[in-house]
Amino acid sequence: MITLDLIVGARPNFMKIAPLIREIKRRETKGDPITFRLVHTGQHYDRNMSGSFFEELDIPEPDVNLNVGSGTQAEQTSGIMLGYEKLLMAKKPDLCIVVGDVTSTMACAIAARKLLVPVAHVEGGIRSGDMTMPEEINRIVTDSITDWFFTTSETANENLRKSGVEEKRIFFVGNTMIDTLLASRPRFVRPKLWDDLGLGKGKYIVLTLHRPNNVDDPVNLKHLLEEIISGANGLPVIFPVHPRTRKVMQGIDLAGGSALHMAEPMGYLQFNYLVERALAVITDSGGITEETTVMGVPCMTLRNSTERPETVTVGTNELLGTDPAAIAPAMNKLLSGNWKKGAIPPLWDGHTAERIIEIISGLL
Ligand code: UD1
């Protein structure tokens, strides 16, 4: 029997793990000797940030919740390592599978590897080159101790080769986040605010912001939001607010604020209903740039770098940087109908999880 630990901790992990669970269960049902233990670190714990995704993406109750909760980077990392190590000492799996680049990814990879449990990293090899991002450190540390890499792009493969990883440990399989997107697309749910605000297809902008260097300074955040509102030229801007950003928003008084519609963080199916029909998305997330690329929705990223360059070279994404002055020209390009069309990167086809579990079954 092949036993797998699947690790989730924060919001962007849930859509990456869901298709792996579906595929393992499919194989279990037909009698294949493979099974999993789902470990939630509890890094995200609100219903809005965690619970709703389990229901919408049909993820089973975690077998274990480490309940680490909020804290500094070191508090979260150490809390997760202590909790997961204890679990491993009670029962070791054949393989620990981590996804993405959040603190839970790195902490569990370290705990597993030190107890001689092999580690597979789904979405391994991506790099922004920006060492001010905690996620970049998580990626580098995780990949330095990963046994098998499941990658989303040729750029990721190349990054791994450059750091000395042998070809036989790299598996270019595509993107499990896109498995979830394509499987869920027919079930997207119209959010209540669609009717409340009288929204129409292509008649609004979706905005998300949560990176510390965009949101932690209230003066900078106010400036960014005011440029976005003025650039949108009267179009409503729908802004589901991350808890980190919400705390800073409380002290801000915005010029033109009536065009900005703040909401709680949304469930996956409602959020992507809005994204699919938006004129454009403005964001500092990485995962959202992949989803907009696949749905062909123009995307402006308020960051100086991206670990997902194919969303720019192939897809609909453009990096604007973090200077609010870059927003007006980009909005002019969008509103005059001159945004690039984009295409879908190789293997982002909805079948990545099947490839991953097939490969793992052969490796173990
Ligand atoms: C984390 C990930 C980031 C990911 C993001 C998506 C790391 C280093 N960062 O950043 O890669 O894009 O999640 O959301 O792992 N909070 C709540 N409720 C929750 C969770 C968090 O109120 O359920 C609050 C916390 O108290 C904290 C803030 O939100 O003040 C930030 O949470 P944290 O997990 O530290 O990092 P994120 O910014 O969410």
Image (cartoon, rainbow, N blue to C red):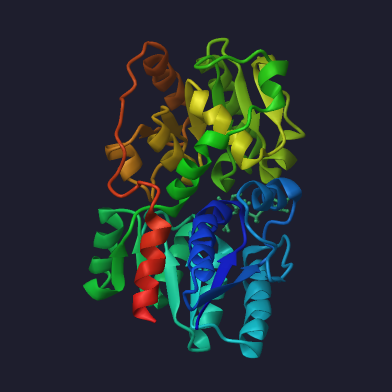
Q: Quadrant of residue 258?
A: top right
As drawn, is 341 to the left or to the right of 260?
Answer: left
* Residue 101 visible in this rendered orientation of the protein: no
As drawn, is 203 to the left or to the right of 318?
Answer: right
Residue beneath the point at 63% across and 34% down: 270
Residue beneath the point at 54% across and 62% down: 21
Residue 216, given in percent of the width and then of the height, sits at 63, 44
Q: Quadrant of residue 199?
A: top right
355 shown above or below 164: above
215 shown above or below 81: above
Total numbered labels? 0
62 shown above or below 258: below
As drawn, is 68 to the left or to the right of 346?
Answer: right
- Where is the C terminus found, in terms of image quarters? bottom left
Closest to the observer: 110 or 244? 110
Q: Quadrant of residue 71?
A: bottom right
Closest to the observer: 128 or 344? 344
Residue 305, given in percent of the width and then of the height, sits at 38, 45
Residue beneath the point at 66% across and 82% down: 87
Residue 221, given in percent of the width and then of the height, sits at 61, 33
* Residue 108 visible in this rendered orientation of the protein: yes
Residue 223, given in percent of the width and then of the height, sits at 58, 27
Residue beneath the point at 64% across and 78% down: 84
